[in-house]
Image (cartoon, grey):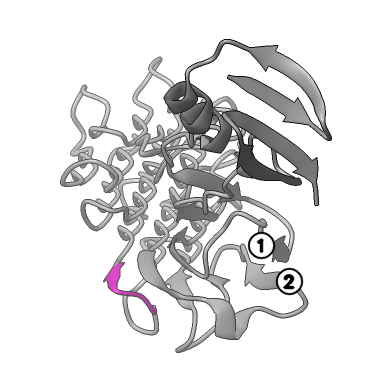
Amino acid sequence: MKIVTNGVGVSTTHRTGICVIFGLFLFALPLAPAHATVVFLTSGTSWAMPVDAPSTFQVEVIGAGGNGYDDGSPGSGGGGGGGYAIRTQDWSPLLSGGNFSYSIGGAGSVVWFGANGAGGVVANSGANGGATGTGGAGGSTTGEVGDVVRSGGAGGLGNGNGNGNGGGGGAAGPASNGGAGGYGGCGQGGGGGGAGGTGTATNGTNNNCGNTPGGSVGGGQGQNGATLATAGTQDTVWTQTSNSATAGPGGGGGSGQQGTTSGGNSAGGSYGGGGGGTRFTNTGVGGPGLIVITYSPIIIPSRTMRLFEGFRIKFVSGRILLRQK
Protein backbone atom coordinates (compact mmCIF):
# COMPACT_ATOMS: atom_id res chain seq x y z
CA MET A 1 0.00 0.00 0.00
CA LYS A 2 1.33 3.43 -0.92
CA ILE A 3 -0.06 6.87 -0.06
CA VAL A 4 0.70 9.50 -2.67
CA THR A 5 0.23 13.25 -2.28
CA ASN A 6 0.08 15.00 -5.65
CA GLY A 7 1.62 11.91 -7.21
CA VAL A 8 4.58 11.63 -4.78
CA GLY A 9 4.74 8.56 -2.53
CA VAL A 10 5.12 9.27 1.17
CA SER A 11 4.39 5.96 2.90
CA THR A 12 4.36 2.23 2.11
CA THR A 13 3.30 -1.14 3.52
CA HIS A 14 0.20 0.13 5.37
CA ARG A 15 -2.90 -1.98 5.48
CA THR A 16 -5.79 -0.57 3.50
CA GLY A 17 -8.27 -0.67 6.43
CA ILE A 18 -5.93 1.18 8.77
CA CYS A 19 -5.14 3.86 6.20
CA VAL A 20 -8.78 4.49 5.36
CA ILE A 21 -9.85 4.73 9.03
CA PHE A 22 -6.86 6.90 9.90
CA GLY A 23 -7.38 9.12 6.89
CA LEU A 24 -11.04 9.78 7.59
CA PHE A 25 -10.89 10.09 11.40
CA LEU A 26 -12.29 13.33 12.83
CA PHE A 27 -10.33 15.06 15.59
CA ALA A 28 -11.90 17.42 18.14
CA LEU A 29 -10.67 18.60 21.51
CA PRO A 30 -12.77 17.23 24.42
CA LEU A 31 -15.25 19.66 25.99
CA ALA A 32 -14.94 20.39 29.70
CA PRO A 33 -18.12 20.01 31.75
CA ALA A 34 -19.99 23.26 32.40
CA HIS A 35 -19.88 24.66 35.93
CA ALA A 36 -22.07 27.49 37.18
CA THR A 37 -20.51 30.94 37.09
CA VAL A 38 -21.28 33.23 40.06
CA VAL A 39 -20.84 37.02 39.85
CA PHE A 40 -21.19 39.60 42.67
CA LEU A 41 -22.30 43.17 42.00
CA THR A 42 -21.59 45.51 44.93
CA SER A 43 -21.21 48.87 43.19
CA GLY A 44 -21.78 50.55 39.84
CA THR A 45 -24.94 50.72 37.74
CA SER A 46 -24.31 48.57 34.62
CA TRP A 47 -23.28 44.95 34.00
CA ALA A 48 -21.90 43.88 30.60
CA MET A 49 -23.30 40.49 29.64
CA PRO A 50 -20.41 38.00 29.14
CA VAL A 51 -20.11 36.25 25.78
CA ASP A 52 -20.59 32.85 27.44
CA ALA A 53 -23.72 33.82 29.38
CA PRO A 54 -27.11 32.53 28.16
CA SER A 55 -30.12 34.83 28.06
CA THR A 56 -31.82 32.90 30.88
CA PHE A 57 -30.08 33.02 34.25
CA GLN A 58 -30.71 33.51 37.98
CA VAL A 59 -30.42 36.78 39.89
CA GLU A 60 -30.64 37.20 43.69
CA VAL A 61 -30.73 40.56 45.45
CA ILE A 62 -30.37 41.63 49.09
CA GLY A 63 -31.46 45.10 50.20
CA ALA A 64 -29.14 47.32 52.23
CA GLY A 65 -29.41 47.44 56.00
CA GLY A 66 -30.64 50.57 57.78
CA ASN A 67 -28.33 52.53 60.06
CA GLY A 68 -28.76 52.44 63.82
CA TYR A 69 -29.78 55.71 65.41
CA ASP A 70 -27.04 57.78 67.05
CA ASP A 71 -27.40 61.40 68.08
CA GLY A 72 -26.88 61.34 71.83
CA SER A 73 -30.52 60.68 72.66
CA PRO A 74 -31.44 57.89 75.06
CA GLY A 75 -32.96 54.69 73.69
CA SER A 76 -31.57 54.68 70.11
CA GLY A 77 -33.35 52.23 67.80
CA GLY A 78 -31.60 49.69 65.60
CA GLY A 79 -31.73 49.75 61.80
CA GLY A 80 -33.86 47.28 59.86
CA GLY A 81 -32.37 44.41 57.84
CA GLY A 82 -32.59 44.24 54.05
CA GLY A 83 -35.12 42.10 52.21
CA TYR A 84 -34.35 39.36 49.66
CA ALA A 85 -35.65 38.37 46.23
CA ILE A 86 -34.69 35.79 43.59
CA ARG A 87 -35.74 35.50 39.96
CA THR A 88 -34.87 33.23 37.04
CA GLN A 89 -36.04 34.28 33.59
CA ASP A 90 -35.04 35.23 30.07
CA TRP A 91 -33.46 38.63 30.68
CA SER A 92 -32.81 39.50 27.01
CA PRO A 93 -35.77 41.95 26.72
CA LEU A 94 -34.02 44.14 29.31
CA LEU A 95 -30.64 44.06 27.58
CA SER A 96 -29.55 47.45 26.22
CA GLY A 97 -26.38 47.80 24.19
CA GLY A 98 -25.02 44.57 25.64
CA ASN A 99 -25.54 45.80 29.23
CA PHE A 100 -28.02 45.37 32.06
CA SER A 101 -28.88 48.22 34.43
CA TYR A 102 -29.04 47.77 38.19
CA SER A 103 -28.94 49.70 41.46
CA ILE A 104 -27.36 48.73 44.77
CA GLY A 105 -29.28 51.43 46.62
CA GLY A 106 -28.92 52.23 50.32
CA ALA A 107 -30.88 52.38 53.56
CA GLY A 108 -34.56 53.05 52.91
CA SER A 109 -34.32 52.46 49.13
CA VAL A 110 -34.31 49.34 46.94
CA VAL A 111 -31.79 47.05 45.29
CA TRP A 112 -32.81 45.91 41.80
CA PHE A 113 -31.49 44.27 38.62
CA GLY A 114 -32.80 44.66 35.08
CA ALA A 115 -35.64 47.00 35.99
CA ASN A 116 -36.99 48.66 39.11
CA GLY A 117 -40.40 47.10 38.67
CA ALA A 118 -42.35 44.19 37.26
CA GLY A 119 -39.78 43.14 34.65
CA GLY A 120 -36.80 42.93 36.99
CA VAL A 121 -35.97 41.59 40.44
CA VAL A 122 -36.34 43.95 43.41
CA ALA A 123 -35.59 43.77 47.16
CA ASN A 124 -36.37 46.48 49.69
CA SER A 125 -33.72 47.88 52.02
CA GLY A 126 -34.16 48.32 55.76
CA ALA A 127 -35.09 51.65 57.28
CA ASN A 128 -32.87 53.64 59.64
CA GLY A 129 -33.49 53.37 63.37
CA GLY A 130 -35.08 56.26 65.23
CA ALA A 131 -34.77 57.96 68.59
CA THR A 132 -36.47 57.04 71.86
CA GLY A 133 -38.04 53.67 71.28
CA THR A 134 -38.24 53.49 67.47
CA GLY A 135 -36.58 50.70 65.54
CA GLY A 136 -36.20 50.81 61.78
CA ALA A 137 -38.55 48.63 59.72
CA GLY A 138 -37.06 45.66 57.93
CA GLY A 139 -37.16 45.52 54.14
CA SER A 140 -40.80 44.58 53.46
CA THR A 141 -42.04 42.10 50.86
CA THR A 142 -44.52 44.77 49.74
CA GLY A 143 -43.24 46.02 46.41
CA GLU A 144 -40.51 43.39 46.14
CA VAL A 145 -40.39 41.52 42.81
CA GLY A 146 -39.20 37.96 42.29
CA ASP A 147 -40.11 34.29 42.15
CA VAL A 148 -39.54 34.25 45.93
CA VAL A 149 -39.40 37.35 48.15
CA ARG A 150 -38.55 37.65 51.86
CA SER A 151 -38.53 40.42 54.47
CA GLY A 152 -35.65 41.72 56.56
CA GLY A 153 -35.79 41.77 60.37
CA ALA A 154 -37.02 44.88 62.18
CA GLY A 155 -34.53 46.92 64.18
CA GLY A 156 -34.77 46.54 67.94
CA LEU A 157 -36.61 49.15 69.98
CA GLY A 158 -34.66 51.61 72.04
CA ASN A 159 -35.85 52.08 75.63
CA GLY A 160 -35.96 55.74 76.52
CA ASN A 161 -36.90 55.12 80.14
CA GLY A 162 -34.33 52.36 80.65
CA ASN A 163 -31.73 54.11 78.50
CA GLY A 164 -31.16 50.97 76.40
CA ASN A 165 -30.41 50.81 72.67
CA GLY A 166 -31.91 48.37 70.15
CA GLY A 167 -30.01 45.83 68.05
CA GLY A 168 -30.08 45.83 64.26
CA GLY A 169 -32.35 43.54 62.25
CA GLY A 170 -30.86 40.69 60.23
CA ALA A 171 -31.02 40.52 56.44
CA ALA A 172 -33.28 38.03 54.71
CA GLY A 173 -31.77 35.34 52.51
CA PRO A 174 -32.50 32.18 50.53
CA ALA A 175 -33.52 30.22 53.64
CA SER A 176 -35.72 32.59 55.66
CA ASN A 177 -36.73 36.11 56.64
CA GLY A 178 -34.25 38.08 58.72
CA GLY A 179 -34.42 37.99 62.53
CA ALA A 180 -35.56 41.04 64.51
CA GLY A 181 -33.12 43.00 66.65
CA GLY A 182 -33.46 42.76 70.43
CA TYR A 183 -34.31 45.75 72.62
CA GLY A 184 -32.11 47.18 75.29
CA GLY A 185 -32.75 48.01 78.93
CA CYS A 186 -31.06 49.58 81.97
CA GLY A 187 -28.44 51.24 79.80
CA GLN A 188 -27.42 47.96 78.16
CA GLY A 189 -27.60 46.97 74.48
CA GLY A 190 -29.90 44.51 72.75
CA GLY A 191 -28.53 41.85 70.42
CA GLY A 192 -28.64 41.95 66.64
CA GLY A 193 -31.01 39.73 64.66
CA GLY A 194 -29.71 36.72 62.73
CA ALA A 195 -29.56 36.44 58.93
CA GLY A 196 -31.64 34.07 56.81
CA GLY A 197 -28.91 32.65 54.58
CA THR A 198 -28.66 28.97 55.43
CA GLY A 199 -31.29 28.37 58.12
CA THR A 200 -34.14 29.96 60.03
CA ALA A 201 -32.93 33.29 61.41
CA THR A 202 -33.10 33.90 65.17
CA ASN A 203 -34.24 37.10 66.81
CA GLY A 204 -31.79 39.17 68.80
CA THR A 205 -31.84 38.67 72.55
CA ASN A 206 -33.54 41.36 74.61
CA ASN A 207 -31.53 42.89 77.43
CA ASN A 208 -33.83 43.00 80.44
CA CYS A 209 -31.47 44.68 82.88
CA GLY A 210 -29.56 41.45 83.36
CA ASN A 211 -25.86 40.73 83.34
CA THR A 212 -25.81 38.74 80.08
CA PRO A 213 -25.18 40.68 76.87
CA GLY A 214 -27.88 40.33 74.25
CA GLY A 215 -27.04 38.41 71.08
CA SER A 216 -28.24 35.86 68.52
CA VAL A 217 -26.89 33.34 66.08
CA GLY A 218 -25.33 35.48 63.32
CA GLY A 219 -26.29 38.75 64.98
CA GLY A 220 -23.96 41.03 66.89
CA GLN A 221 -23.74 41.03 70.66
CA GLY A 222 -25.17 43.98 72.57
CA GLN A 223 -22.89 45.78 74.95
CA ASN A 224 -23.17 45.12 78.68
CA GLY A 225 -20.63 46.65 81.03
CA ALA A 226 -17.10 45.79 79.96
CA THR A 227 -18.39 43.52 77.18
CA LEU A 228 -18.38 45.67 74.05
CA ALA A 229 -20.90 45.52 71.24
CA THR A 230 -19.96 43.44 68.20
CA ALA A 231 -20.89 43.71 64.54
CA GLY A 232 -23.23 41.32 62.79
CA THR A 233 -21.62 38.39 60.99
CA GLN A 234 -22.07 37.09 57.46
CA ASP A 235 -24.12 33.97 56.77
CA THR A 236 -22.00 32.69 53.87
CA VAL A 237 -24.05 31.37 50.95
CA TRP A 238 -22.23 32.17 47.68
CA THR A 239 -18.66 31.98 46.32
CA GLN A 240 -17.68 34.22 43.41
CA THR A 241 -16.10 32.34 40.51
CA SER A 242 -13.47 34.94 39.57
CA ASN A 243 -11.71 35.26 42.93
CA SER A 244 -13.36 32.83 45.40
CA ALA A 245 -14.74 35.72 47.48
CA THR A 246 -17.70 34.74 49.66
CA ALA A 247 -20.94 36.56 50.43
CA GLY A 248 -24.30 36.13 52.06
CA PRO A 249 -26.91 37.98 54.12
CA GLY A 250 -25.59 39.72 57.23
CA GLY A 251 -26.78 39.64 60.82
CA GLY A 252 -27.79 42.80 62.64
CA GLY A 253 -25.24 44.73 64.67
CA GLY A 254 -25.36 44.54 68.47
CA SER A 255 -26.34 47.83 70.10
CA GLY A 256 -23.95 49.92 72.13
CA GLN A 257 -24.23 50.62 75.82
CA GLN A 258 -26.02 53.81 76.76
CA GLY A 259 -23.85 56.77 77.72
CA THR A 260 -20.47 55.39 76.60
CA THR A 261 -18.07 56.78 74.03
CA SER A 262 -16.35 53.44 73.30
CA GLY A 263 -19.18 51.03 72.60
CA GLY A 264 -17.39 48.57 70.33
CA ASN A 265 -18.66 48.02 66.79
CA SER A 266 -22.42 48.00 66.14
CA ALA A 267 -22.24 47.71 62.33
CA GLY A 268 -24.64 45.47 60.46
CA GLY A 269 -23.09 42.46 58.75
CA SER A 270 -22.49 42.37 55.03
CA TYR A 271 -24.71 42.06 53.25
CA GLY A 272 -27.87 43.87 54.35
CA GLY A 273 -27.61 43.62 58.15
CA GLY A 274 -29.11 46.54 60.09
CA GLY A 275 -26.82 48.59 62.33
CA GLY A 276 -27.34 48.58 66.09
CA GLY A 277 -28.47 51.70 67.92
CA THR A 278 -25.65 53.60 69.64
CA ARG A 279 -24.98 56.77 71.55
CA PHE A 280 -21.91 58.94 70.87
CA THR A 281 -20.02 56.17 69.00
CA ASN A 282 -21.61 56.39 65.53
CA THR A 283 -20.66 52.80 64.62
CA GLY A 284 -24.11 51.38 63.82
CA VAL A 285 -23.77 51.50 60.02
CA GLY A 286 -26.04 49.19 58.04
CA GLY A 287 -24.54 46.56 55.74
CA PRO A 288 -24.55 47.34 51.99
CA GLY A 289 -26.82 45.70 49.41
CA LEU A 290 -25.78 42.90 47.06
CA ILE A 291 -26.66 41.39 43.69
CA VAL A 292 -25.68 37.79 42.88
CA ILE A 293 -25.85 36.48 39.30
CA THR A 294 -25.59 32.75 38.62
CA TYR A 295 -25.51 31.25 35.11
CA SER A 296 -24.43 28.08 33.33
CA PRO A 297 -21.87 29.17 30.72
CA ILE A 298 -22.45 28.33 27.08
CA ILE A 299 -19.82 25.85 25.88
CA ILE A 300 -18.17 27.13 22.71
CA PRO A 301 -16.87 23.99 20.92
CA SER A 302 -13.36 23.92 19.51
CA ARG A 303 -12.89 23.68 15.74
CA THR A 304 -13.21 20.17 14.35
CA MET A 305 -10.13 19.15 12.34
CA ARG A 306 -10.23 16.54 9.57
CA LEU A 307 -7.06 14.68 8.69
CA PHE A 308 -6.16 15.34 5.04
CA GLU A 309 -8.61 18.26 4.97
CA GLY A 310 -8.32 20.06 1.65
CA PHE A 311 -7.28 16.89 -0.25
CA ARG A 312 -9.25 14.64 -2.58
CA ILE A 313 -8.78 10.95 -1.79
CA LYS A 314 -8.66 8.46 -4.69
CA PHE A 315 -7.84 4.72 -4.85
CA VAL A 316 -5.79 3.69 -7.92
CA SER A 317 -4.21 0.24 -8.36
CA GLY A 318 -3.90 -0.42 -4.65
CA ARG A 319 -2.63 3.05 -3.88
CA ILE A 320 -4.29 6.00 -2.13
CA LEU A 321 -3.80 9.22 -4.06
CA LEU A 322 -4.20 12.53 -2.23
CA ARG A 323 -4.64 15.52 -4.48
CA GLN A 324 -5.33 19.05 -3.34
CA LYS A 325 -8.77 20.34 -4.16
Residue beneath the point at 36% across and 61% down: 133
- Prevailing SS of the magenta stretch: loop
Q: Is residue 208 above or below residue 115?
A: above
- In this orientation, which residue lies closer to the viewer: 221 or 293? 293
What's the amino acid at mark 1?
Met
Image label count: 2
Of the image marks 2 and 1, the number of the one nearer the N terminus: 1
Residue beneath the point at 46% across and 61% down: 61
- In this orientation, which residue lies closer to the viewer: 224 or 137? 137
Quadrant where the N terminus is found in the figure: top right
Which residue is tagged 1?
49
Residue 48 spot, x, y in % from top left? 72, 62
Task: Identify the mark at residue 98; answer none if there is no mark.
Answer: 2
Residue 60 spot, x, y in % from top left? 42, 60
The answer to which image quadrant residue 34 occupies is top left
Could you tell me how far apart the alpha carbons at marks 2 and 1 are, in whole angstroms? 6 Å
Task: Identify the mark at residue 234; answer none if there is no mark.
Answer: none
- In the displayed structure image, the side of residue 269 where residue 172 appears, left or right: left
At label 2, counting other C-alpha atoms closer than 10 Å, the crowd grade (few under 14, some 14-19, many 20 or more) is few
Q: Is residue 310 above or below residue 145?
A: above
Q: Are marks 2 and 1 in contact (CB under 8 Å)?
A: yes
Q: Is residue 28 visible?
A: no
What's the amino acid at mark 2?
Gly
- In this orientation, which residue lies closer to the viewer: 190 or 311? 311
Q: Secondary structure at mark 1?
A: loop
Stretch in magenta: 145-149
